[in-house]
Amino acid sequence: MAVYDVGGRSAIVSGAGSGIGRAVAIELAANGASVLVFDLNGDAAEKVADEIVSAGGIGVAFDGDAADPETVERSVAAAQKLAPLGIAVNNAGITGESNPIGDYSIASWRKVMSVNLDSVFYALRAQLPVMVGNGGGSIINMASILGSVGFPGSSAYVAAKHGVVGLTQNAALEYATQGVRVNAVGPGFIHTPLLSDDAETTKFLADKHPIGRLGTPEEVANLVLFLASDASVFITGSYQLVDGGYTAHLAMEKY
Ligand code: NAI
């Protein structure tokens, strides 16, 4: 487990009921943050909050849709009640259908854009002014390796994640002098319920990482914790990969 002090502040983690978000919520709480465990799946959020509390930390479940601007505003108010909001990890995301663009449904395009990109804008819009008022903070937006390269069949996901990287840079520029840092994280393929579980797909994806396997949620959470903490105080507007060499690999070979 990584150790970086994030005490004395609250943290919102969206999509914290499963996978990467769950690991991030647990890691932030273990290092002192009071964590709002925000998920569309209220039962999953409760479970993670219970896990945090059983381990001696502060975790409170928040049941709601990260793609709904009013809910996002409420999440900021709820976190402020725990402690001054100092950390936000905008992580909720979905994959959408897998189809070439000519066959890609407009409904899936809109859904993926709404959950994976609009939600990050709503979150930044609600979180940034409050963090400025609190004297500063650190926001981490969950992009993907697919925020910098393509993946056949996943146009909406790829476009949304590229958008998350651009939005992160803009937010960082606009708030750098006001004490709020904004960074994006680009995980390679990580073993979570988001991915199909069949052995053939897992091997296909694992082989694209020079390290030779998928990543774990905890490996992503270690990076997020560092970016959330004051140890990364000179880092803003960056896009940090945690990808087992995936993108370096793509530069070497034809896809
Ligand atoms: P996951 O499916 O394990 O967890 C996602 C969580 O988000 C679930 O608990 C789900 O209920 C919640 N959620 C979905 N829509 C929501 C909404 N509208 N509002 C609130 N909560 C919502 O997924 P995983 O793998 O942990 O992914 C987390 C993030 O990491 C996503 O943004 C994903 O795109 C990104 N990512 C994942 C990778 C992977 O290989 N698993 C690789 C790169 C990025």
Image: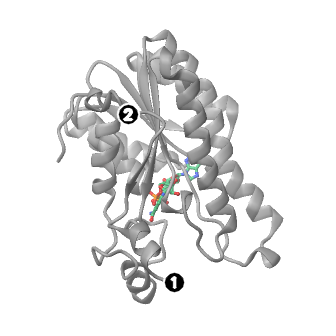
Bin the neighbour count of mark 1 within 10 Å (Cα to Cα): few under 14, some 14-19, many 20 and up.
few
Mark 2: C-beta under 8 Å from nearest atom of ligand 1: no
Which residue in the structure is indicated by mark 1? 254
Q: At which x and y percent is residue 158?
A: 62, 62
Q: At which x and y percent is residue 104?
A: 77, 73
Q: Amino acid at mark 2?
A: Ile
Q: Earlier in the sequence, mark 2 or mark 1?
A: 2
210 vs 25, nearest the viewer? 210
Which residue is painted at 77% across and 74% down in the image? 101
Which residue is painted at 68% across and 43% down in the image? 118
Tally the numbered discs.
2
Bin the neighbour count of mark 2 within 10 Å (Cα to Cα): few under 14, some 14-19, many 20 and up.
some
Q: At which x and y percent is residue 156?
A: 69, 62
Q: CA distance from mark 2 to mark 1?
A: 32 Å
Disc marking residue 225:
none
Q: At which x and y percent is residue 193?
A: 44, 66
Relative to 154, 109 lies left or right? right
| Picture quadrant where residue 138 is located | top left
Which residue in the structure is indicated by mark 2? 235
Q: Are marks 2 and 1 in contact (CB under 8 Å)?
A: no
| Disc 1 secondary structure class | loop
Residue 50 visible, this angle:
no
48 vs 238, nearest the viewer? 238
Relative to 95, 194 lies left or right? left
| Disc 2 secondary structure class | loop
Q: Amino acid at mark 1?
A: Lys
In the picture shown, does residue 136 fall above or below 25? above
Relative to 149, 155 lies left or right? right
| Picture quadrant where residue 181 is located | top left
